[in-house]
Amino acid sequence: MSYAIPTNLPWDKFVGAWEEAEEALARLDQALASSALKTAWLRRADFEEAAAALWLEGDLVPLEDLVLDDANTNARAPSHELFQARSILLLRRRLGRQEPLDALKLDGLISLQETRDQVDEAAREDTMDLLMQDPDWLAETRLEDWLYILPAFDAFPALPATAVALHAWNHIQPFQQRNETIGRLLAPPLLWRRQKIDGQALCLCVGLKALRWFDRPVVPLESWIKVFCRAVTRAAQDGLKRLQELSLAQTQLARRLEGRRKSSRLPALAELILEEPLVSAPMVARKLDMSQQAAGTLIEDLVSTGVVRELTGRSRFRAYAIA
């Protein structure tokens, strides 16, 4: 499908939202670059972005289930929504491991769909997905069309250019399934390619969720650029807040760990709690190579300090996170 490349943009329609997004994203990227918690922040962001991406499609998956499933410690049977969230999580991680120039090549884009299809046998056998497949879709040709026009957007500043690129992606629709979601996951590599951010600093789906933006047909370009910029602003502001909360929790944990024996496993547990949105006793036992009973005792030690809290209110299958 062809896409009409704009020769100019209606700057007056979105310039305010664009300036706010530029400032917010720059602040977050700078804060992450100078933070020792960047790796922990990015790992948490992957989970949050996957859950938000599924929400935008109209499905819900508890963040707890996604985290525990990723650690292979989920006591519940996996649902269809969990399979889909898992595929989105793997796609974001795959993009984070690649350089943007590699991710935005034909082979790299085709591999995204292959990654999704290979998540699990149950996901591949989804009846509805099979019924909706069009054998004449020509996904590779559509990807080539999108990649062909991508350099034309470099005439615009990075944020509006990324918004236009995603608008073109939704218009050309390279993939039959989850096309909009995959497009949104390409926002960080597109900005990374333009050296606007370093890595996966943007969680566009988180920002769109905060704006209550659901999947919908292609909207007018000027409206989409404004929504995109507002979502970038919200995502960057929320991301900076989460980084500050992590930094505060790290300081509090460090104080609680002063004077502990060198053989204590609490420092390793504290590091794990900073990296994961939540933990459970089986998850801690698996990652720290210890018994579940010992893991539960360690967790309760931190809970007693007030730095960590229990989330579920249950007596069994409990989950914990920083307070």
Image (cartoon, helix red, strand yellow):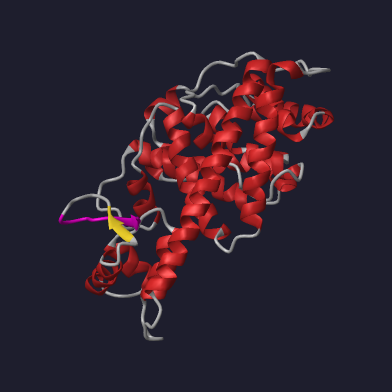
Q: Residue 3's x, y, as percent?
A: 73, 17
| Left or right: 186 as drawn, with respect to 195 | left
Q: Residue 286's x, y, as percent?
A: 34, 68
Is residue 104 or residue 191 the one in the foreground? Answer: 191
| Left or right: 74 as drawn, with respect to 222 | left
Query: Residue placed farthest to the left in the image?
Result: 315
Taking 241 as reference, is 1 above or below it? Answer: above
Q: Residue 190's x, y, as percent?
A: 70, 39
Is residue 3 or residue 250 the one in the foreground? Answer: 250
Task: Specify whether residue 225 is painted magenta.
Answer: no
Name the residue at 61% across, 27% down. Answer: 228
Quadrant position of the N terminus in the picture: top right
Name the residue at 56% across, 28% down. Answer: 180
Is residue 27 or residue 287 the one in the foreground? Answer: 27
Q: Residue 81's x, y, as percent?
A: 36, 36
Do we see residue 88 in this rendering?
yes
Quarter occupied by residue 60: top left
Name the residue at 30% across, 67% down. Answer: 305
Magenta segment range? 315-323
Name the residue at 59% across, 23% down. Answer: 227
Is residue 112 or residue 312 the one in the foreground? Answer: 312
Quadrant position of the C terminus in the picture: bottom left
Quarter occupied by residue 292: bottom left
Do we see residue 3 in this rendering?
no
| Left or right: 7 as drawn, with respect to 256 | right
Quarter occupied by residue 153: top right
Task: Specify whether residue 316 is painted magenta.
Answer: yes
| Left or right: 216 as drawn, with respect to 316 | right
